[in-house]
Structures are given as structure tokens and as C-alpha cells.
Amino acid sequence: MNPPNLLYAKTHEWTRVEESGGAKIATVGITAFAVEALTDLVFMELPKVGRQVKAGEAFGEIESVKAVSDLYAPVTGEVIEVNSGLPEKLETLNADPFGAGWVAKIRITDDSALSNLMNAAAYEKQCAEEAH
């Protein structure tokens, strides 16, 4: 079940937006659906802190025994923090993709991309269509 308080990208990233010191901060991760589809995870490349990203742009990579997939920034802004322990503990993505499995935090500089993200119901509909 996808948490209803998050926003979702068509490329299977989730986003939690919070206000912090007058700035909007997006915590970004990959969904349980994506983790299940990738199966055995073997490698992850996180974005660099300080990197400017645009919504829809690849900003990292995750690799399984089956494929290499890009991670896409769901928002435009600056990467201000990464979950640096995640590449050594990829099993965290299976255990807690919407919590401890977060990938990066982005300070949003242009929030117009938020309107392109889906709510949980729309994302679940997309996943059901992809599963067929």
C-alpha cells in the first residue's frame, strides 16, 4: 500500500514535501512497486550533495541483477542531503521503502513540477496497469 500523504512520479519515485525554515524540502525515494519490479538490488549511485537537479532529470542510479535503472528527480532544486548508508544496505529499500529507504532531500527552487506528480490513488492505478 502506498502512503496517501506522498506524491508519486510516473517513474516510480515518491516525494514528501515539508516546510523547513521557510523553504520547501522534498524527501525522495523509490516506491515499493519499483523495488519489487527490480528484485535483487546490487548497487545504487546517489546524487551528489549540492547538485542542482531539474524535475524529470536522472540524478542517480539503481542496479539489480536484471537491469540498471535511472532515478529521476521529481522536483527541481538542490540536493541538500543523501541517505549515505543506503548503498551499503540496499535491503532497507525492501524493508522500509517509504521511511528508512529514502534516497535524497532536495530543497525545491521551483515547485511547478509538484502539479505533475500523482496522488496515491492515481499512482496505484498506474501500477495496476503496468502489472498487466
Image: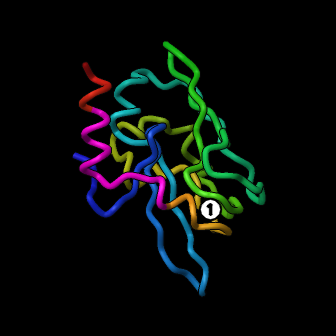
Q: Is 75 colored magenta in this rendering?
A: no
- Residue at x 58%, y 67% (from the top left corner): 111
Q: Position of residue 61 (x, y in %)?
A: 62, 33
Q: Quadrant of the C terminus?
A: top left
Instruction: Compare residues 55 and 52 and report the one nearer the observer.
Output: 55
Q: What span is colored magenta in the figure?
A: 115-127
Instruction: Please state if 75 lies on the left or on the right of 119 as rendered.
Output: right
- Residue at x 48%, y 37% (from the top left corner): 11
Q: Position of residue 86 (x, y in %)?
A: 54, 44
Q: Position of residue 19 (x, y in %)?
A: 51, 79
Query: Overall secondary structure of the magenta stretch?
Result: helix
Q: Position of residue 74 (x, y in %)?
A: 55, 51
- Residue at x 57%, y 31% (from the top left corner): 62
Q: Residue furthest top?
A: 66
Visual colour scheme: rainbow
Residue named by callout 1? 106
Q: Is 124 colored magenta in this rendering?
A: yes
Position of residue 16 relative to residue 67, above or below, is below
| Crowd rating for badge 1 (residues with CA inside 10 Å; few <14, some 14–19, many 20+) | many
* SS at mark 1 in the image: strand
Mark 1: amino acid: Ile
Instruction: Compare residues 77 and 82 and report the one nearer the observer.
Output: 77
- Please give the count of numbered marks on the rendered protein: 1
Position of residue 56 relative to residue 99, above or below, is above
